[in-house]
């Protein structure tokens, strides 16, 4: 065991979550006289901003995720456990994990991110998966690719073929816009691979309840994004409410539409840190933190990233759930703890340095608002690509992603269009019985449906 980790006289910093916030805290404490335990329920750090590219077959999971253990390999004061936090005892300063282990802490950092919110319609989740984890992305990839396969096999029933080629994305924020653009591009790029169906006829519908897509951008940039989406044949429907989602359909503003693929990109709910801590939260479940990101009444517990509601002095609303916010908060808390354990004056308030926001729509089309500079089109797209490659966690991923993008740009092809995990359900489909997975074991369920269609056709 490295000396740094074994040295139990050093204060113990327990970090939960190996996302942008948790990892940057650990890294900021690299040289500090502390023992760090990082607990992450997966064995990898995920670069969420590129998840939609896995969901639409442009990248593979390994290109946007790296093992946490590998990232912290050379940081001798850090130990990584693949485990899940389940409970916190603030009185005895212990946390409990799913594996039944207890960890005592001197400092606790909760950086457990967020998940989807269906605004009280949790029953929609089975029909309209969201995009938050690598499993979500694989699931969506599966659904999208199977929809094209089923359309190819559906030679008799035009309505069902149409439903298979209809993709509804709910939510006009960056994830919804990126998904809509990427599915439209995918449909065009695979057109020559199909014989019975023209995938170019895919109907990609982006639904937004508000009056414009990308509402966090200036109206002119939103307008530009909408125009670019429409140029790619995306049907952008603003001021449109989703009223119902069920098996094979959605109801939009009172009208029922047949579709086999609905993607949820509308709502976010923070991880249950507020419940673990029994601390006040905002409407999205984010813990309301002090200016230094500590939990009121507990200067040894910090909540950061997507789990925190941090409203800087003078600001009207809390900082948004963005990767740079999470990273900077992690660095801040790392510096604060390092200063305290060294007996130095700790910084008193977190200040966010906002370098701007950007989003991509599709090939040659992106928008970027860099405060003093606003760009769109090809320049916005190039800038978006460069920034995302730069922020990928390791060198290998940067090279792989850059090569993949270049190849896709030159050939219009998508490299990872594999449908996997259907083995068990294949039999369910042939004999007409339901997959054992049921609706939540999605790959099996969808595989069975696909094959049932095949045997019928
Ligand atoms: C599809 C998508 C696209 C996005 N695009 C952009 C973008 O273009 N630009 C941008 O700035 N931001 C983007 N974001 C937002 C950005 O990814 C988040 O703001 C950022 O990831 C927040 O970092 P975090 O560390 O707080 O949470 P996360 O990165 O979500 O990390 C939380 C970690 O905690 C772990 N965890 C959760 N619960 C537990 C538990 N109980 N025990 C142990 N571990 C646990 C999770 O497995 C996860 O690894 C996007 C998000 C999504 C989902």
Image (cartoon, grey):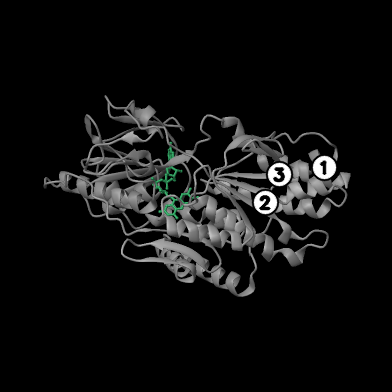
> Looking at this view, is 340 or 317 the one in front?
317
Q: Is residue 210 left or right of residue 14?
A: right
The residue pinned by badge 3 equals: 260
Q: Secondary structure at mark 3?
A: loop
> Looking at this view, is 315 or 349 the one in front?
315
> Looking at this view, is 222 or 335 the one in front?
222
Q: Secondary structure at mark 2?
A: helix
Quarter of the image where one finds residue 189 = bottom right
Whether pointer 2 and pointer 3 mark residues with C-beta atoms closer than 8 Å, the reply is no
Tell me if residue 248 can be seen.
yes
Name which residue lies at 33% across and 50% down.
325
Distance in Å between CA atoms under marks 1 and 2: 17 Å
Mark 3 and ligand 1: say if the CB distance to the nearest ligand atom is below 8 Å. Answer: no
> Residue 23, image x and y in percent?
36, 50
Tell me if residue 1 can be seen.
no
Q: Is residue 313 above or below residue 222?
A: above
Q: Secondary structure at mark 1?
A: helix
How many numbered discs, if any?
3
> Residue 79, image x and y in percent?
35, 47
Q: Is residue 353 left or right of residue 195?
A: left
Quarter of the image where one finds residue 111 = top left
- Label disc, if present, on residue 144 of the rendered structure: 2
Distance in Å between CA atoms under marks 3 and 1: 15 Å
Q: Is residue 373 above or below residue 259?
A: below
Instruction: Give the mark nearest the N terminus, 2 or 3.
Output: 2
The residue pinned by badge 1 equals: 452
Distance in Å between CA atoms under marks 2 and 3: 9 Å
Q: Is residue 171 left or right of residue 245?
A: left
């Amino acid at each position: 065991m490295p000396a740094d980790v074994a040295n139990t006289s050093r204060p113990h910093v327990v970090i939960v979550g190996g996302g942008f916030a948790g990892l940057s805290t650990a890294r900021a404490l690299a040289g500090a006289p502390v023992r760090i335990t990082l607990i992450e329920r997966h064995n990898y750090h995920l670069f969420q901003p590129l998840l939609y590219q896995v969901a639409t077959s442009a990248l593979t999971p390994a290109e946007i995720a790296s093992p946490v253990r590998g990232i912290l390999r050379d940081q001798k004061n850090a130990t990584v456990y693949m485990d899940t936090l389940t409970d916190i005892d603030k009185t005895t300063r212990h946390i409990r994990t799913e594996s039944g282990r207890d960890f005592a802490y001197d400092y606790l950092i909760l950086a457990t991110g967020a998940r989807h919110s269906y605004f009280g319609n949790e029953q929609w989740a089975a029909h309209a998966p969201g995009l938050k984890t690598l499993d979500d992305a694989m699931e969506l990839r599966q659904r999208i690719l199977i929809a094209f396969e089923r359309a190819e096999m559906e030679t008799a029933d035009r309505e069902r073929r149409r439903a298979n080629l209809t993709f509804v994305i709910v939510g006009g924020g960056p994830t919804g816009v990126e998904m809509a653009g990427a599915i439209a591009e995918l449909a065009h790029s695979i057109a020559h691979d199909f014989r019975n169906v023209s995938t170019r006829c895919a109907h990609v519908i982006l639904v937004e309840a508000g009056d414009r897509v990308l509402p966090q951008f200036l109206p002119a940039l939103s307008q530009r994004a909408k125009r670019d989406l429409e140029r790619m044949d995306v049907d952008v429907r603003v001021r449109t409410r989703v009223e119902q989602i069920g098996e094979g359909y959605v109801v939009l503003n009172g009208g029922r539409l047949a579709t086999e693929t609905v993607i949820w990109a509308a709502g976010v709910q923070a991880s249950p840190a507020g419940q673990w801590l029994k601390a006040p939260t905002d409407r999205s479940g984010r813990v309301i933190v002090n200016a230094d990101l500590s939990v009121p009444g507990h200067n040894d517990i910090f909540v950061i990233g997507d789990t925190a509601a941090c409203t800087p002095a003078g600001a009207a609303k809390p900082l948004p759930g963005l990767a740079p916010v999470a990273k900077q908060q992690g660095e801040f808390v790392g510096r604060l703890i390092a200063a305290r354990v060294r007996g130095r004056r700790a910084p008193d308030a977190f200040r966010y340095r906002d370098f701007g926001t950007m989003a991509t729509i599709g090939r040659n089309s992106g928008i970027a608002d860099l405060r003093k500079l606003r760009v769109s089109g090809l320049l916005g797209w190039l800038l978006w690509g460069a920034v995302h490659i730069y922020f990928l966690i390791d060198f290998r991923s940067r090279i792989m992603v850059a090569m993949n993008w270049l190849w896709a740009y030159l050939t219009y092809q998508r490299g990872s269009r594999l449908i996997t995990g259907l083995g068990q359900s294949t039999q369910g489909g042939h004999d007409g019985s339901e997959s054992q997975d049921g609706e939540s074991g999605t790959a099996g369920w969808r595989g069975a449906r696909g094959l049932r269609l095949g045997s019928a056709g």
